[in-house]
Amino acid sequence: MLIEALIAVTLVSAVAVMLAPDKVAGKLAFALSLLPVAGSLWMFAQFNASGNALFESGSLAFETTAKWISVGPYALNWHVGLDGISMPLVVLSTLLTSLAILSAWTPIQERQSQFYSLMLFMLASLLGVFTALDFFVWFVFWEFVLVPMYFLIGIWGGPRRKYAAIKFFVYTNVASLLMFIGFVALVFALPVQTMDLPAIAAALDAGNFQTTYGLGAETLKVVAFFAMFIGFAVKVPMVPLHTWLPDAHVQAPTPASVMLAGVLLKMGTYALLRFNFTLLPGVARDYAVLIAALAVLSVIYGAMLALAQQDLKRIVAYSSVSSMGYVLLGLVAYNVWGLGGATFQMVAHGLISGLMFMCVGVIYNAAHTRMVGDLSGIADKMPVTAAVFVAAAFGYMGLPLMAGFAGELFIFLGGFSATFPYAQLFTALAMFGIVVVAGYLLFAMQRVLFGPFSADTDYDIVPAAPHDAVAIVVLVVLVVVLGTVPEVFYGMIQDAVNPMVDSLPEATAFLTGGEL
């Protein structure tokens, strides 16, 4: 019952903060957010699962199954548990939420109790997404995440906050509907009377398909695969379904941007891994060239768009589009390095992108502008922020001994070892994206941080507040630790992706090693 306790504590904390007066809401929210952090770290220390959550051979950590309700012939049960894929994402969610709340103390001055309550409610929903193993339970949590983010953007956002919030909600809600239709159509063609994901995975593996909607088994698999793929690609987001993201980031308050880039985007890649690449690996293999082309398009196009921006938030937002392309490339490689690297990169990018947005937020708190052309020589006024910003940027570029390097290295090893046509060419093209990333980040750093000091603003530029400095320093330390000792997470990740590779008949042609 530990997962239920973790979610319940977070929900109770959200209610407590909602009822608290504004003057203590921020400090109370941070203190209470440390409870799920402590819980997730204790679960990580006690983690003893093996294998993959969707395979019968796997054993889950902290698993709970209970009857819930029936809808017609289908049983909807409460089923939660953790494997080596979901455990790191749970830890990421709790840590990043606490630090995002800490970073909100400076910019959030109105309706504070409501703001911090929504942050905690979002964390509870994220914990459900990463632990649920019944589709209906998972889908409820998936949709619940949209609610707090909609209000965080729409109430505390910038001048065009209503437009950005509505665009975010419409895009992701329509995508969820398409994904839901694809998955349910797949289930209706199987001889199962449950929405339990391991049971559905077993039925798909057995191949007991029924002709449904006039579609044969193979055709239905393809239709369901791409319905789910498009739905999840919007959440990631992948090019050309990415246009909601820059607007959401630019208008959102910085703590919400931290959570959006750091964790919410990982919901899409996590779902692609769990549903498309675990349940329907054959379709993923058959359309690997198309998927790899989309991955490379996202890497290059996202990086080029970032290169053309002047707003620091837009630069980091388009960087996320580019980075998520690497995750998709690792998934489609479908070997231990690729799948493990994609999962590791989810965590690494969560930390680095959250750190980048925090640094941008600290600069904006002081200068009240994010435009590259309006700032120069900030390092003289904000040395700690500047140093951390440089470290975060180099982490994004894949500097060795930082988390971004480890994730990209695993993905590139997987890409060059993949067996689908032109895999090596796609991987080489994706590697070129790092050059573009270095270009726009070095340009932004040189213009904003270095040179003679100047600021097109009436505000005095002062060093970061102590709580802001603590938040960004803790994050940069985590980035370095994960890059220096990737085995902290990679060992359990590899253990969880091994069954996926072994389940594919052609897996013997892939790289099946991957020990560090």
Image (spheres, rainbow, N blue to C red):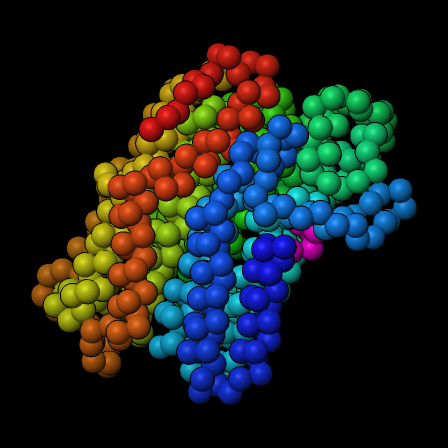
Answer with the quarter of the image where residue 341 lies. Answer: top left
Instruction: Indicate the position of residue 207 as horizontal and vertical percent values.
Output: 75, 21
In the image, 378: left or right of 56?
Answer: left
Residue 442 visible at all: yes
Instruction: Indicate the position of residue 430 as horizontal and vertical percent values.
Output: 37, 31
In the image, 386: left or right of 426?
Answer: left
Name the quarter where the C terminus is drawn.
Answer: top left
Instruction: Indicate the position of residue 441 as horizontal and vertical percent values.
Output: 26, 50
Q: Nearer the viewer, residue 410 or 168?
A: 410
Residue plotted at (67% across, 48% down) = 64
Residue farthest toward the left in the current orientation of the protein = 452
Query: Does residue 156 lie above or below 86 as drawn?
Result: below
Residue farthest toward the right in the current orientation of the protein = 72
In the image, residue 405 lies in the stretch drawn in magenta: no
Residue plotted at (43% across, 18% down) = 511
Name the quarter where the N terminus is drawn.
Answer: bottom right
Q: Nearer the viewer, residue 471 or 159?
A: 471
Query: Does residue 223 lie above or below 446 as drawn?
Result: above
Residue plotted at (55% across, 26% down) = 499
Residue plotted at (80% across, 30% down) = 190
In the image, 324: left or right of 434?
Answer: right
Instruction: Indicate the position of residue 141 as horizontal and vertical percent values.
Output: 65, 56
Answer with the quarter of the image where residue 437 lies. Answer: top left
Q: How many marks?
A: 0
Residue 259 visible at all: no
Query: Does residue 404 lie above or below 413 as drawn?
Result: below
Query: Does residue 278 lie above or below 306 as drawn?
Result: above
Magenta segment's dominant SS is helix
Q: Which residues are magenta?
A: 136-141
